[in-house]
Image (cartoon, rainbow, N blue to C red):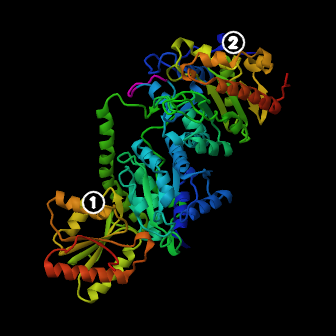
Amino acid sequence: MVKLTLTGNYCVAHAVKLSRVKVVSAYPITPQTTIVEKISEMVDSGDADIKMIRVESEHSALSAVYGAATAGARAFTATSSHGLLYMHEMVWWAAQARVPLVMAVVTRTIGPPWNIWTDHHDIMGQRDTGWLIAMAETNQEVLDETIKLFKITEDPRVFLPGIIGLDAFILSHTVEPVEVPEQEAVDSFLPERRQPYTIRFGDPLVMGNIPSDLLVNARMRWEVHKALESSAHVIDEVDREWGKITGRYYGGLVECYRCDDADFLFIGVGAWVGDMRLAVDKLRDVGYRFGALKVRYIRPFPGARILELVKGRKGVVVLDRSISAGSAGPIFLDLAAYLQGKRVTVPIKDVVAGLAGFEVNYEDFVKIGEKFAGEVLEVGWVKDYLEFYPSR
Amino acid sequence: MPLTIRDLPREKYVLPGNAACPGCPEAMGLRYVGMALGRKAILVIPAGCTSIIQGLHPGSGLSFPIINVAFASSDAVAEGVAVAKELLGEDGVVVVWAGDGATADIGFATLSGAAERNGNIIHICVDNEAYMNTGIQRSSLTPRGAWTTTTWKGKTEPKKNMPLIMISHGVPYVATASVAYPLDFIEKLRKAASLKGFKYIHLHAPCPTGWRFDPSETVEIARLAIETGMWVLLEAERGVITISAPSRPYIDKRRRKSVVEYLKRQGRFREIPEELVKEVEKEVDEYWTMILKLSSQQIQ
């Protein structure tokens, strides 16, 4: 193990190299670019044994890694924002074809206007496709989860592609001290690539022709859902195994900070959970017992885990960094539906904040927390279940 | 020694029960791909008629390994497959089998990108000159004057010159072919398979359904395209153009049949105006002049 100071993007590059990825294809887009630059540098200096396909678009980037993965090679791509939207067709294709591969998404808002800062509209737009979607809070988590995703996606109980999400600039371009594992440790952790089928010369396997029986097709769709459900267990299992090697177990699908005796919980995904932790400490200093619940995986949605943690609280405030326009924030929608389905009633509010990269820090979370706690204590429920922050 | 029919393998790659229309040139073309490359080929097939022709899951009317892919993705998928197979030490040929839309229109950026990178694949454009699978809509490879369901009075723009565009990419091998000349096509496929890097073969494929002629006449119409000089069989190795044997007689303009003979056999040109026929004739002459300037053969 060595300790290096690395940006989130360089953590991705190191993880890709350590995972012995064979084929990488990507198209530059801010803020993803330094991932593909770093991998290129590793390849050109002879440091990594990877074949790069330097394509002309993101649509082709995911197409090329999909082809390589279908043919039997461990493959990786990375993108952001408009690049992710441009490859969206292939995002569906790769998942529904049940081809394991890994993609890093450096979350960035969507234009117009042109804007390179983080929000989660790009990654949330992929949540119906069948991919596993993880979001990291720290650069260490970026590195760890990228390596783990190769093992999780190539597990026969899963056999789906996976995304590691990291917030633009807050993680992607900010350095942190990171423990980089030895190659031998990763080799012993990560088995040879497994996949449900492989296209081969001389073997007339046909992938994707028109079905004669639509029920077969319908079942394929449902099986993607079931595979995502069963991935929840695999994610936890792999996280524990990685924890034994590195001492870093993240709690599987969710991680909780000072939740045990909390009356109120923040729920969020990504880098700003770090600010929520700080806000929890500050709020406790002034008498509000808050905790912070980090959703580490958007897909599979950890409804059961969250339910156990929110049940019986005085109130839960979800921080969504994107909005399904015309409805509400996606984390809130998933959670509210799950709780309703399980007949669990908790005052729950969705605060949509940090859109378009508008900065939200721990002081903002303190304000949001104080206002929310006051409201719940006053009326016994929330006044409006959906709010935009800042309100003025 | 030139290839003869007796030299061709008997193994079938287009099977009974496939869903091609009667007289389908794509089914013919796929048979020739099987004869040329056999078990060496993996096919990458974007949306198009062959999505249908291959038949229904769990069966298959084609006995190649096939990856069906999204419309604009095929050359990138194929390059990914080729790269992985080389890394894994598995030997064979990765072929994109794409229509005119997936080649010249929606798939063009992907094609151009793979060609510029010299990806080790063969792209076959099976050109039936319109979007036949969705019901005969115009493409950039539909010829001027042709009726389609989106050009009811005939297309006003000329056919995009894909072979020259691909030659301009500086790839190792570009060829044109016709379903009426299978041995020429098979020889070109085999040559392409023997070369490393990006290879492009443009197969002219008259479609009875979309061009409005009797399904028994596919080969005749395809042959007429060559005999009138409307379609020219050629090869370009490292940019040097050679006119292929079936088209060589028609370097001499006097030996070409009248363009009218080709047009009048097809319902899609039924209402083409007289002056546009003259225009098409002129374009054929101009095309030959340009091709011959770029080739090693002499203008006669």
Classify residue A189 by image quadrant. Answer: bottom left
Q: Is residue A319 left or right of residue B5?
A: left
Residue B230 location (% of width, % of height): 68, 23
What chain does badge 1 belong to? A
**Residue A270 vs residue B256, the one in the foreground:** B256
Number of numbered discs on residues: 2
Q: Amino acid at mark 1?
A: Asp
- State whether residue B181 appears in this view: no
Q: Tell me if mark 2 has few (under 14), some (14-19) or many (20+) residues whose alpha carbon lies within 10 angstroms of its own.
A: few
Q: Which residue is mark 2?
A: B4
Q: Residue at x 34, y 54 (%)?
A: A234
Element type where label 2 sits in the image:
loop
What element does badge 1 sit on? Answer: helix
Image quarter (top left, top right, bottom left or bottom right) of the C terminus of chain A:
bottom left
Q: Which residues are magenta?
A: B56-62
Classify residue A314 by image quadrant: bottom left
- Do marks 1 and 2 share a subunit? no
Q: Chain of mark 2?
A: B
Residue B124 placement (x, y as % from top left): 61, 31
Q: Would residue A18 be found to the left or right of residue A135 on screen?
A: right
Q: Main secondary structure of the magenta part?
A: loop
Q: Nearer the viewer, residue A260 or A226?
A: A226
Task: Look at the image and say whether residue B60 sits in the magenta stretch.
Answer: yes
Q: Is residue A30 left or right of residue A300?
A: right
The residue to which callout 1 is attached is A334
Position of residue B188 measured from the top left corner of the image (x, y, whole percent) = 69, 25
Image quadrant assignment for residue A377: bottom left
Distance between mark 1 and mark 2 Cα atoms? 66 Å
Residue A100 has which mark? none
